[in-house]
Amino acid sequence: MLAITDLSKSYGENSVLREVSFSMTTGERVALMGPSGSGKSTLLNCISGIDRPNSGSIELNGQSIGGMDERQLCELRRDSISTIFQFFHLLPTLTMRENIEFPMQLIRLAEKERKKRVDELIHEVQLDHRADAMPDELSGGERQRVAIARALATRPVLILADEPTGNLDTTTGESILDLLETVSGRYQTAMLLVTHSKRVTRICQRTVSMKDGRIVDDEK
C-alpha cells in the first residue's frame, strides 16, 4: 500500500532524512518513534506531498507521489490520505456534524451518502449526544474523537497521526488509542502514528524507530 525507497531530504546543508526505506500494507498500524529532530515530521510531510524529497521514491497504491504536480498532490490529500493532529484542528465555526461532513463535500459525495456516513461515524466515535455541539463546547478527548471521525469520512487508504494522544491525559489517551485500533481494523485503514509514547505501540503491529534522519530499528 505504501512503499518508501531510499528517501532523502535536506534543507540547505541540513540533512533531515537519509536514505529512508520502509513499507506498509493495507490496514497496518505502524508506530514511528524517535527523538525530536530525528526526521519523523519531515517524513510525514513527504508522504503527504507537503514537502518534496531530494531523492528516493514514495509510492501509494502503486502511484508515484514524486511525479505528481500540485493539483494531483491536493487530490491525493483530499481522496487518499487523512491526517489527525495533536491539537485537533477542527473548524471552530462548524458543529461537530459539519466538521465531519466537510471533507465529503470536497470530494462531492452525494448528500444522502454524506448524511449516512456522518451518522455512522458519530455513532462509531460514541458522540451521538454531541452531534450539534461546537468545538469549543467539547472536551479534548471529544474533539479528538471528532477529528478521528473526520479523518475516516472520505475512506482514506492511509491516516497519518501526529502525536494523536499528546495533548490528552492518560485515561483519555488510552480511550483514543482503543478507538484508533477499532476503526482502523473495521475500515481497513492503514495508520502511521508519530509518537514519543511507548503506550501508543500497544495498538501497532510494528514500531519503526528513527535517529538522525535514518531508520535504526523496525520491529514487530
Image (cartoon, rainbow, N blue to C red):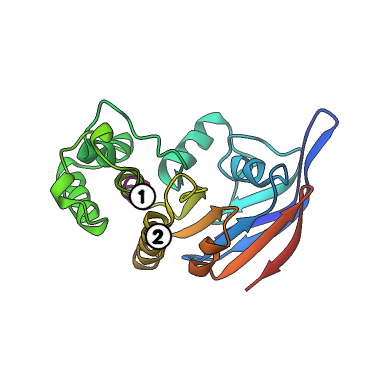
Give the label on residue 148, or none: 1
Q: Which of the 4 image quadrants contains residue 17?
A: top right
145 part of magenta stretch = no
User: Percent from the top left, x then y, of residue 128?
Assistant: 16, 51
Give the residue type that dot 2 points to.
Answer: Leu
User: Percent from the top left, x then y, of residue 201?
Assistant: 55, 65
Range of the magenta residues? 149-155
Q: Nearer the viewer, residue 21 or 194?
A: 194
In the picture, measured across the screen, residue 151 lies left or right of residue 44, that is left
152 part of magenta stretch = yes
Within-10-Å neighbours for mark 1: few <14, some 14–19, many 20+: many
Residue topped by disc 2? 180
Q: Which residue shows up at 52% across the image and 63% down it?
A: 199
Furthest-bottom residue in this view: 220
Mark 1 secondary-structure assignment: helix
User: Percent from the top left, x then y, of residue 175?
Assistant: 36, 60
In the picture, measured across the screen, residue 178 lies left or right of residue 133, that is right
Q: Which residue shows up at 42% across the image and 48% down it?
A: 168
Within-10-Å neighbours for mark 2: few <14, some 14–19, many 20+: many
Q: Which residue shows up at 67% across the image and 54% down it?
A: 4
Q: Which residue shows up at 38% across the image and 64% down it?
A: 178
Give the residue type that dot 1 points to.
Answer: Ile
Q: Which of the 4 image quadrants contains residue 12?
A: top right
